Image (cartoon, rainbow, N blue to C red):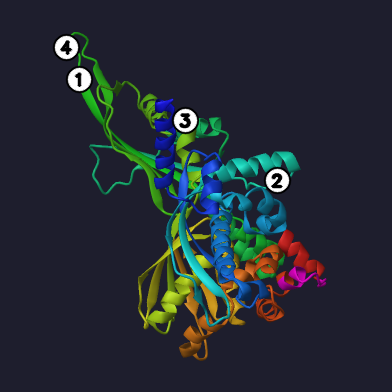
Amino acid sequence: MHRTVLAVLSLLALAAVQPILPAHAQRAAMQPQPAGQTIIVSAEGLADPKAPQYARDKGILIDDLRRDARRQAVEKAVGVFVDSQTLVQNYTMISDRVLTRSDGLIKQVIKETDPWLGEDGFMHMLLKAEVYVAGVEEALKQMSRDQRVALIRERGDPRISVAIFAADADRASNIAPRRSQIAENILKERIQSFGYRVWSEEHAEKLRLELMARSQLEGQTDVTLSVSQQRAADFTIFGEAKFKTLSARLPTSGITVSKYVLTSWTVACVDNATGQEIYFNNKVPTGRSWNDEDVATRDVGQIIGQEFSRDLFEQHLSAPSRIFQLQVLGLPDYDAGELMRKELMGLRPVLNVDFRNFDASGMSLFEVDFTGGRNAFARIVNDTMVRPLNAKLGDRSFRLVSTRGDLVRVAYNSADGSDLVDRLNKLPPASLATAAPERIRAIAQTEATLEAVRKINPDGAAAAAGESKPTSDAVKAIRNF
């Protein structure tokens, strides 16, 4: 009896010192945590401070603001697997099955700002969190199976080009090495065994130039479109092997025997979307010699082919995001750069963004962690970054200048660049330009706030208000293409 009383008292004492977790933390603790890869996501939560329920209880405002920030973090993780248009079209279903599980899918909140009331009339909160990518992907796959809809975008079927050169180590260095078709064909067979496509850079470039010439002469729109579709390979494998000829005269027969010895070789693979070398090697296989040069180059092709596996390519095709350098020309002052960073941070495909350098007379540099797909990268950047910024400002101040590898250049042009800070502060966040009607409805709870959103996203605001807005067949076709 005495021991039982002591045990009960010990349990009560232990319970007394345990921290009482907030409701959302208690729910997260009770949910099974998915294992696997995580990503770091920065997101912005928004709320309408004019909503009547917040006047009665400011605590509800803070809770809703934090909830929206967490949902945005998970929505960005969803964007790793689902393109923006598909996400908006299926927002209610994805919200019910994935976004509402933000507590279970967020491993930890790394940083959270204090809420602030912006000059745009919204309450803001910035949040950085670690999100379970594996849990998001599994939830999306299960939903796709249950609802029989294709949500997750395709990642595979890359185009891979091959260039293998063979050179004589005894030749002068100014003699160009020659392409080895034998070694290349061996490597191409290995690539095709993965189910991937072998791509001819030379033929694609020749066809692109021919189509460009035809489009200029004939002024045909369909030909111009064909030109834009002639893109380079996704990956390029290139290598060079140098052979040395060793000759020896047999004393008994007087016959001269020649052998080919591999003296050096290099092989590398470049991700053409980013310029990153995903593989490189210069190890020289020792103890190998051949009686015939063609046999030597064939075996070298097999040696190089063994260096590549399906996993090597899939690892880079399925990477959750890519980092690129964003150069912005024309930002009038440093404050504009900081506000630009906040606007980018709120956009769906942007996981994180750092403001690296500022130059009022030149290029300001941002580093952007981006979830857009590999194909049509320039169009994705233009649609998901440049257009929302222009929708916010109500003009075409920002213009995509170029995309090359991991470098994107955008120019800011305005008759009066000095008012950029004022416009970025006072106009609704650019993220609402591509927001789903369901999110707009949750945030813009007063007519004044809805009207502010309507200026940058008329279709979304109309749908949020239950209004029908006719859209032309051409616009529908473009959106659904």
Residue at the image position 49 percent from the left and 30 percent from the top = 190
Q: CA distance from mark 3 to mark 1?
A: 30 Å
Which of discs 2 and 1 lies nearer the camera? The answer is 2
- Residue located at (44% from left, 28% from top): 4
| Quadrant of the snapshot with the C terminus | bottom right
Which labelled disc corresponds to residue 251?
A: 4
Relative depth, front residue between 378 and 332: 332
* Cβ atoms under marks 1 and 4 closer than 8 Å: no
Percent of width and height locating residue 174: 26, 49
Residues at circles 2 and 3 in contact by the CB criterion of under 8 Å:
no
Report crowding for label 1: few under 14, some 14 to 19, many 20 or more residues within 10 A (C-alpha): few
The nearer-to-camera label among 2 and 3 is 2
Q: Earlier in the sequence, mark 4 or mark 2?
A: 2
Q: Where in the figure is residue 410, as x and y percent of width and height? A: 48, 73
Residue 205 visible in the shown view = yes
Q: What residue sits right under mark 1 in the picture?
A: 248
Task: Give the amino acid at mark 1.
Answer: Ala
366 over 132 or under it: above or below: below
